[in-house]
Amino acid sequence: MSTFKAPKGTYDLLPPDSATFLAVREAIARPLRNSGYGYIETPGFESVDLFARGVGESTDIVTKEMYAFETKGGDRLALRPEGTASVLRAALEANLHKAGNLPVKLWYSGSYYRYERPQKGRYRHFSQVGAEAIGAEDPALDAELIILADQAYRSLGLRGFRILLNSLGDKECRPVYRAALQDFLRGLDLDEETLRRAEINPLRVLDDKRPDVQKQLTDAPILRDYLCDACKAYHEEVRELLRAAGVAFEDDPRLVRGLDYYTRTTFEFVHDGLGSQSAVGGGGRYDGLSEMIGGPALPSVGWALGVDRTVLALEAEGIELPLPSVTSVYAVPLGEEARRVLFAKVTELRRLGIATDFAYGGKGLKGAMKNANRSGARYAIVAGERDLAEGVVQLKDMESGEQAPVGLNEIVAELETRLG
């Protein structure tokens, strides 16, 4: 037993469970790759100021949850708590927006870090797949991203999720709503910290999950009543495009997101089988973020889906993904000459794309066949001195138990035929 353990609030991803996580990542990424999104990877840490400006200085992420540190050179860095700011920073730094093909469509997959109270579905280290479409203001782009996420979840067999949809307005109409909401919040019995937050970003108070706060927000003004005509028309087109695509959604006039950069379209994917941590993903439009971090005006939209929570949603619905076998063929040599000969065949099979493993460590027949069973292999190749002298190996079907000799020179072609 090691004296070291994984840090609190984190987890190790190990076989066989890791295969499910990989399958979920692939399922989420597949519709994106088929829709013009290219893969991007950014550093695991960035300047603290990037997140303070983009995510919002008043957010819990920045004030309480970021893992921030100072380097030996005096730089203030933070482990990335979310992906959008990093992806936009990278796109701006590389001048992708100047290539003349807007929107710049990017997808990513990685680990993110927030110092939170650990509980099921909420970790200090978590995995997300995200997508960003940078540089275009178009309701069809908002609808496209929601449709692609819906497609990904349905391809996994999920049916118990819901899409919540709202509009947060823009720089024209949101200030009016902000002022009305602040007036309302000032009349409530709120703690000092919440009142301070209400002065900086009152929409964040609407996202407060505490029951005593939510109870007081029942009569809070609703943003949709303050939307300007342009935002109303934009939002209605998003809704129409989703309906035309057959994607069900629920209008949630009280839906806000926990980050400051969101404007207009905002949405969440929730699953009722996950308890209090019901959100499995979400996103929205962030038309002003580029300017917040020093770039030009680049209206953009994106989302991030939690891999960890998607796996929990699959478990809640009792869905087991049809995962490919890790090993299709297992080679069992009996003796040194057989080790040399079968290892060469294993290498040949692997080069053909057939998942093949080998009985390492010089185990006897009984122990090696136990390993072959544990591997999940469909076939086992067994060979000893007598087999080699006759120019054959023994091919065993691990499902039926049938075993028959096959010529040494024919075994690769035979397995290729059987495994298709």
Image (cartoon, rainbow, N blue to C red):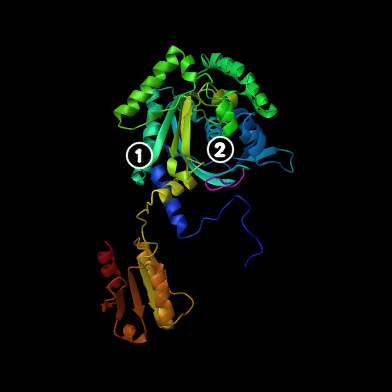
Can you say which quadrant of the picture contains the N terminus? Answer: bottom right
Which residue is at the front of the view, 367 or 361?
Answer: 367
Mark 1 surroundings: few (<14), some (14-19) or many (≥20) residues within 10 A: some
| Residue 252 belongs to magenta span | no
Under mark 2, the amino acid is Glu
In this rendering, does residue 134 appear at all? no
In this rendering, does residue 173 appear at all? yes
Mark 2 surroundings: few (<14), some (14-19) or many (≥20) residues within 10 A: many
Instruction: Identify the main secondary structure in magenta.
Output: loop
- Kindly identify which residue carries mark 2: 82
Query: In the figure, 68 relative to 328: above or below?
Result: above
Q: Residue at x 52, y 24 (%)?
A: 218
- Kindly identify which residue carries mark 1: 151
Query: In the figure, 151 relative to 326: above or below?
Result: above
- Separation of residues labelled 2 and 1 (CA atoms): 23 Å
Secondary structure beneath dot 1 equals helix
**Magenta-drawn segment:** 117-123
Which residue is at the front of the view, 98 or 39?
Answer: 39
Q: Is residue 87 left or right of residue 52?
A: left
Q: Residue at x 37, y 53 (%)?
A: 321
| Residue 120 belongs to magenta span | yes
Q: Is residue 392 left or right of residue 43?
A: left
Can you say which quadrant of the picture contains the C terminus? Answer: bottom left
Q: How far across and how far down the image is residue 287, in percent?
A: 50, 23
Secondary structure beneath dot 2 equals loop
Q: Residue at x 65, y 21 (%)?
A: 199
Q: How far across and how far down the image is residue 334, in percent?
A: 40, 82
Q: Is residue 264 left or right of residue 350?
A: right
